[in-house]
Amino acid sequence: QVRLVESGGDSVQAGDSLTLSCTHSNYLAIRPCMAWFRQAAGKEREAIAAAQDSGSTTFLADSAKGRFTISQDSDKKTLTLRMTSLKPEDTAMYYCAAANNPLVCVSDAWFYAASYNYWGRGTQVTVSS
């Protein structure tokens, strides 16, 4: 059974930085395709970033460009999201996701939650102004 566990969420001030981690087990994809999504209260889940293998291919949503960095360490079975210059609008539950199909991470499919087969339970990020 594939298991994804997020960590690193916290309550911070605007302008602060935060690093989220997702460790996975039993995810045996030859070319791991993993992503971060977030969901704010009352809003739909949205894609933030995706990475294939150990960062050979990465995607960032417009809201993340210039502030967030995604990295994947296949050996350590860890996906990381480094967030800087946090804003109150970044407040959300952040979820880690993994896909069986490696093509998700080389196409626009990365952006859609339905493309992913496995999900963690999330870690809360709260940014105060």
Image (cartoon, rainbow, N blue to C red):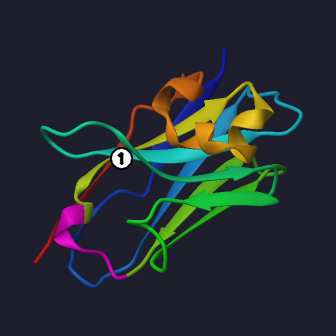
Q: Where is residue 51 in the image (x, y as percent from the top left)?
A: 68, 53
Which quarter of the rendered picture does the N terminus lie within? top right
Q: In the figure, is residue 121 to the left or right of 66?
A: left
Q: In the figure, is residue 90 to the left or right of 20?
A: left
Which quarter of the rendered picture does the C terminus lie within? bottom left
Using a 10 Å C-alpha cutoff, classify the residue at mark 1 as few (fewer than 14 neighbours), some (14 to 19) or many (20 or more).
many
In this view of the protein, which residue sits in the foreground, 120 or 55? 55
Judging from the image, what secondary structure is the residue with disc 1 in? strand
Q: Quadrant of residue 9?
A: bottom left
Q: Quadrant of residue 29?
A: top right
Q: Position of residue 39 (x, y in %)?
A: 29, 43
**Residue furthest toward the right?**
30
Boundaries of the magenta span: 85-89
Q: Magenta segment: does it hold 26?
A: no
Residue in the image at 84% along x and 50% along y: 75
In terms of secondary structure, what is the magenta stretch mainly? loop
Query: Which residue corresponds to mark 1?
Result: 38
Under mark 1, the amino acid is Arg
Q: Where is residue 99 in the image (x, y as percent from the top left)?
A: 67, 30
Residue in the image at 48% along x and 80% along y: 66
